[in-house]
Amino acid sequence: MTDRPPVKDFATEWDHADPQWVADPYPIWEDLRERCPVAHTERYGGGWFPATHAGVSAIAKDTENFTSRTVIIGNGRPSELDLPAPIGVAPPITSDPPFHAIARKLLLPAFAPGPINALEPMIRELCGRLLDGLEGDVINAGMEYAKYIPPSVIRTMLGFPEDDIEKFIDFINIVLEGIDHPLEQRIEEFTPVEEYFVAQMDEHIANPRDDLTSYLLNVEIEGQKLQPEHVFGTMVLVLIAGIDTTWSAIGSAIWHLANHPDDLARLVNEPELMPVAIEEFLRFYAPVTMARLVKHDMEYLGCAMKEDDWILLGFPAANRDPSIFADADKFIIDRAQNRHVAFGLGIHRCAGSNLARLELRVAIEEFIKRYPRFELSDASAVTWASGQIRGPRELPIRVRAS
Amino acid sequence: MKVSIDPALCQGQGRCFSIAPAIFDFDDLGNGVVIGDGTLNAESVALARLAQSNCPEHAIFIEES
């Protein structure tokens, strides 16, 4: 993606992989909100980016005119091979109505607050163990802490062997890095992942137990168990949607606190602020943008949209819309009224939102308990993920005075 | 005064039962539900309004009486 020329005008050639967008997208979105407010691009085969809350909300809720069959923008227009709608490759995120409701309804009980809240002691213990393993005055809070929390939680939920954690993290890298590769290449790269998952599914069929894999293998739609492809697709979804998203959210929150000692001190001294602070972290640093495809040629929000044009749903941009949020560009740690859309809007609301919130809260609570004072050790060494998930990767934090 | 959640609008964002667990609960899918018949007293009205103002889906309704 780096072979594209730098963007001169984001209103007419927006590119979410452009270095300027990756480094600091917020001024770009502010400018687009005032000028467009739906930006266009010819890149990626053509697409649209609504920069306002109203535009994002309208499209997110409109499943008549937009499809979710592909939610990650590829290098060109979607190929026919990418179109197993209404189910899609990773149900229910790639599913459209009416199948979507069936696939979602069977997944949601596993991610409802009841079963998710029961994971809190395990996550707290995990965070403590990761912090115990960090050495030195400067730690990499991105690559040594935030990165490890979601895969370990997902591995536990799926009921895969603890000893496989390094293999599991390798698979996650394959899945996440291959996400916009051409389909044929993706299939080849996915082969070891698929083989491992199928072996795990077989093992769970032989030895069913109380975990997400057994749940998906045994749950029934109208008396029928799921097709193995559906189970596999949903496991892949859990990987794609549950790892670098939450990793990014945790990293962004630590990055913020490292840069804002007043906010850090307030959180340390007023732990009861944590729930509202978590929502403000999610609003201000919402990590996830999702794509849709235009279903048919139409005039929409004043734009001449064509069938299979991409839509990039900028939930993080909607969260900075001053028509919805007072002082939208200010991080207010005790913001009481916060109708943010970090987890999307409408029928595709992030199914893992309860888990993401729990991981984010526990990860920050444990981090600031261990390190009540910390700061960036080298701001220029911080790197940010590009593409549809935004968050810090290299995040050197000085946790002890030198 | 009474509070209600429109189940056709609720998507399980989870804000209401986190902000006001005495007024809202969640069902097996994680969608918000009102505890009891939703009647609000002088104390609970402010919390219900706070939950309403945090619902991204605008699914919470407060009936004045």
Image (spheres, coloured by chain):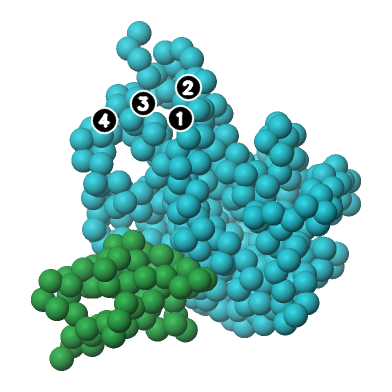
Chain colours: A cyan, B green
Mark seen at residue A261 = 4
User: Is the Cβ of the residue at disc 2 closer than 8 Å to that at disc 1?
Assistant: yes
> Looking at the image, do the residues carrying marks 4 and 3 touch, with CB atoms under 8 Å apart?
no
Numbered disc in front, either 4 or 3: 3
Residue at 33 percent of width and 68 percent of height: B16
Residue A313 visible in the picture = no
Q: Which residue in the structure is indicated by mark 1?
A: A128
Residue marked by disc 3:
A370
The residue mark sitting in front, 1 or 4, is 1
Q: How many marks?
A: 4
Where residue A4 sits: x, y (%)?
69, 43
Residue in view at x 51 percent, y 58 percent: A115
- Residues tagged by mark 4 and mark 3 found on one chain of the structure: yes
Which residue, given by chain and number where applicable, does mark 2 sit on?
A132
Which type of secondary structure does the marked residue at label 3 adopt? Answer: helix
Q: Is residue A118 above or below residue B57?
A: above
Question: Nearer the N terminus, badge 4 or badge 3?
Answer: 4
Q: Same subunit under labels 1 and 4?
A: yes
Are callouts 3 and 1 both on one chain? yes
Q: Distance between the residues labelled 4 and 3?
A: 16 Å
The quarter holding residue A363 reads top left
Q: Pointer 1 indicates a residue of which chain?
A: A
Q: Where is residue A69 in the image (x, y as percent from the top left)?
A: 71, 68
| Residue nearest the observer in this picture, A237 or A57 | A237
